[in-house]
Image (spheres, rainbow, N blue to C red):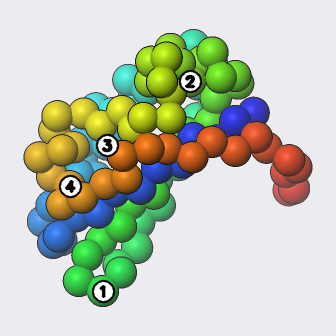
Amino acid sequence: MIARIWRGWVADPEAADAYTEFVTGTFLPAACRIPGCRGAQVLRRIVGDEIEFMTILRFESIDAIKAFAGEDYEVANVAPRARELLSRFEPRCAHYHLAFEAG
């Protein structure tokens, strides 16, 4: 299992709510239909005057990630609607192989 981790920030609560609606209603359902996608989590926290979102997508292989993100799979795949709502975002994603899991 490989976790694809990426962060983006919004400037205000209204943008955060709109981004949440986009992610849960459009982005995650589409991403989770990709063969090899094994689920997702989105974390949210207030940091100073911004709201940070961390997206964790889980894939079974690098090939599955490439099916989602393209050959240069570390580049963030940020949808146009997300770009409208986010005040900034990381241009690249981090990928981690699952070392162990408990529970």
In the rendering, at what x and y percent does residue 80 appear? 17, 34
Mark sitting on residue 65: 2
Nearer-the-camera pick, 24 or 90:
90
Which of the two discs, 3 and 4, sits closer to the camera?
4
* Mark 3, other Cα within 10 Å: few <14 / some 14–19 / many ≥20: some
Is 82 on the left-hand or right-hand side of 100?
A: left
Alpha carbons under labels 3 and 1: distance apart? 23 Å
Mark 1: few/some/many CA within 10 Å (<14, 14-19, 20+): few
> Where does residue 66 sit, x and y in percent of width and height?
53, 18
Tag 3 and tag 4, C-beta contact below 8 Å: no
- Using the rendered view, name the quadrant where residue 103 is placed: bottom right
Task: Tell me what residue is drawn at x 46 percent, y 50 percent.
Answer: 6
Mark 3 or 1: in front is 1
Q: Amino acid at mark 3?
A: Val
C-alpha separation, residue under disc 1 versus residue under disc 4: 16 Å
Q: Determine which residue is flagged by label 3.
A: 23
| Image point (20%, 55%), residue name | 86
Q: Mark 1: which amino acid?
A: Gly
Please give the residue where the numbered disc 1 appears in the rendered image: 48
Q: Amino acid at mark 4?
A: Leu
Which residue in the structure is indicated by mark 4?
86
> Earlier along the polypeptide chain: callout 3 or callout 1?
3
* Dot placed on the residue nearer the N-terminal end, 3 or 4: 3
- Residue 23 picture location, percent across and down: 31, 43
What residue is drawn where x is 75% and y is 33%?
1
Sequence-first tag of 2 and 3: 3
Q: Is residue 86 above or below residue 49?
A: above
Question: In the rendered view, would you say 28 is above or below 51?
Answer: above
Pointer 4 or 2: first along the chain: 2
